[in-house]
Every structure is written in structure tokens, then in C-alpha cells.
Amino acid sequence: MKQIAIITTVPDVIHTIIDNSILRQAKDHDVVTFHVIDVREFGKGNYRQIDDTPFGGGSGMVMMAEPLLMAIDFAHERIGDLENETHVLLPAPQGSIWNHDCALENTKDENLIVICGRYKGIDQRVIDKYVTHEYSLGDFVVSNGELTAMIMVDSIVRLIPGVLNSIQSALTDSFARDLLDHPHYTRPREIDGMSVPEVLLGGNHKNIQSWRQEKSEERTREKRPDLWKKYRQSLVELETNNE
């Protein structure tokens, strides 16, 4: 069973996300065990201090090293299985851009510890000692690390076999095969003068598959030319290897 420890200053937020998303299904199916660790439990003094002003001056506050180091040590103890490598993930602006391949990489046997940062960031010494992977969702900033961290955790967990009712659903999502997903339709057949494409109603699975492939390629070419270029290059490489 994969174990994921999440170090946070607001554990209620993490529990709420787990209990109201696909993560709950992972927990209920005994595929993933979540350990939600409140870093304030390791804060200093009567006020459980976890942040302080930066050395060298400047605005904002920095998460202190000592509480985080203690929380990470505790997370390792909770996970328990030290035979497998544990990935320690930190959402950070300097990290690699998060994508499907990053999520897939983190579905493997390694357990995960995810640090939810706050304020101006965390003491660099925590990163130097423990963090194995830094990731960024993109060139923008959100108000807390919980949002970023749980997006990453959700995208990882849904790819683990046994979480979704059908893993094939995840494997055909956008980005899983260098193409955007094709359009989807459900009942009713017609609404506001708009009808479901006839090919989807005919029952010819070969024609349906061809239509879906065509629409995936068309959507990718028009909306994500960067992905389309990557997809075309992969086809060229495949043809070259088969010669």
C-alpha cells in the first residue's frame, strides 16, 4: 500500500479535500494511506511559532527550519517502511513544471512526503537536507501550498491502479498520450437544437474509434500546437525505429 504524508499548517483543509475527492476512494479501497501532519505541533514556544523574519532583511516571513525538520522526521516514522526510497516533494517556483509524466513517476513504489509551504517560502536548509523533488504548477503564485500540493497528490493518486473504477479512464485522459482528449456526449441526444454526432449512435466501434482519434488530433492541433508538435515528432521517431 502506498503511503503519503502531507505536512501542513491547516490540516482541516487537507482532510476536507481528501474526504470530498477521488482521494477518499483511494483511502477506502486501502490503496493509499494518508498521514496528515500539522507542522504547528512542532512549533516553538507557547505560541507554536513556525515562521520568522528572513536573515538579511526584506518583507514577508519564512517557515522556520526546526519545526519542518521535526515534522519530516515524524513523517518518516509514520510511513515506517524505509526499505523503499521516500520522495519528498515541495511545490516551489523553482521546481520543474508539473505534468502527466511527473504524476506517473510518483505513482511507483516510493512513498511520498509532501510539504505545503507558506509565506515567502521555507528555510533553504530544509530543502538541502530532505527535499528530493521540487515542482511548479506554472508561472503564477497562489496564497498557500495546500492548493498546489493537493492538485499534485490528486493527479498522482488517480493514476494508481485500484483507485478509479476503471484505470483505462485515466489512461485515455488528456496528456496521457500526447493528445488532448476527444469530445464527450451523454443523454439527451438533442438539446437546444444541438445533436450528438451520428457516428457515436451507430454502434460501429471501429468508426467510433476513428472519429475519436480524429477529434483528438484536431483539438490538439488547434488548441495546443506545442503538444501537436510533440505528438507528430513521436510518430516520426516511431516510423524511423520501425524501418
Image: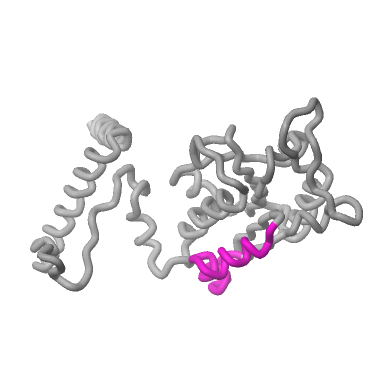
- Number of labels in the image equals 0
* On screen, residue 83 above or below 191: above
* On screen, residue 76 above or below 132: below
Quadrant for the N terminus in the image = bottom right
Colouring used for the render: one colour
Q: Residue at x 74, y 58 (%)?
A: 38
Q: Does the magenta stretch include residue 1?
A: no
Quadrant for the C terminus in the image = top left
Task: State the image quarter where residue 120 is shown.
Answer: top right
Q: Which residue is drawn at 28% across and 34% down?
A: 225
Q: Where is residue 233 in the image (x, y as percent from the top left)?
A: 28, 31
Can residue 109 be seen at all in this image of the molecule? Answer: yes
Q: Position of residue 200 (x, y in %)?
A: 14, 64
**Is the magenta region chiefly helix, strand or loop?**
helix
Q: Which of 217 and 161 is in front in this view?
A: 217
Can residue 242 be seen at all in this image of the molecule? Answer: no
* On screen, residue 169 above or below 181: below
Q: Which residue is drawn at 38% across and 67% down?
A: 166
Q: Which of 205 and 144 is in front in this view?
A: 144
Q: Is residue 119 left or right of residue 157?
A: right
Q: Position of residue 9 (x, y in %)?
A: 71, 55
Q: Is residue 17 magenta?
A: yes
Q: In this view, does 11 lie to the left or right of 71?
A: left
Residue at the extreme top: 56
Q: Give the magenta part as a residue range.
A: 10-32
Q: Which residue is drawn at 84% across and 54% down?
A: 48
Q: Is residue 158 left or right of residue 175?
A: right
Q: Nearer the viewer, residue 181 or 54?
A: 54
Residue at the extreme front: 59
Q: Position of residue 147 (x, y in %)?
A: 56, 52
Q: In this view, does 141 lie to the left or right of 221?
A: right
